[in-house]
Amino acid sequence: MNQINDAFRMVSHWLAELLAVFAGIFGVIEVALHDFMTRLGVPSNIQSVILLVIGVLFIIAVLRLFGGVLRLLIVVLLILFLLHIVAPNLGT
């Protein structure tokens, strides 16, 4: 039974690390695009729409590239990023 628990811990740790990598990548892309559009003078409401479209494109790409539980976890993570774009002060 101890081997099963160790295997479960290893897989769950691997998934958590993989999601952290994806969250970091998507966060860097979001911030970079936001800063770039701000420097171009794009209004914030247009920025939100553009970032939402890009987020939906990321979700479509994840649905096409990944499968199973990993697909589900990444899609949930991206939906949380989209919520952050729509309502950035929701958590405060």
Image: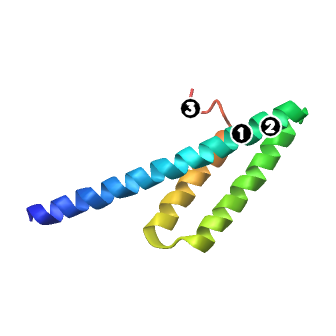
Disc 2: CA contacts within 10 A as few (<14), some (14-19) or many (>=20): few
Q: Earlier in the sequence, mark 2 or mark 3?
A: 2
Residue 32 is labelled as 1
**Mark 3, mark 1: which one is toward the viewer?**
1
Q: Which disc number belongs to residue 91? A: 3
Q: Secondary structure at mark 2?
A: helix
Q: Quadrant of residue 46?
A: top right
Task: Please state if 8 lies on the left or on the right of 85 as rendered.
Answer: left
| Type of the residue with mark 2 | Phe
Q: Is the N terminus in the top left, top right, bottom left or bottom right quadrant?
A: bottom left
Amino acid type for the residue under numbered disc 1: Ala
Residue beneath disc 2:
36
Whole-percent x, y for residue 49 in the image? 81, 47
**Location of residue 37 with respect to 13 vertically, above or below:** above
Residues under numbered marks 2 and 1 in contact, where contact means CB atoms less than 8 Å apart: yes
Q: Residue at x 44, y 55 (%)?
A: 18
Q: Alpha carbon of mark 3 to alpha carbon of mark 1: how far?
A: 22 Å
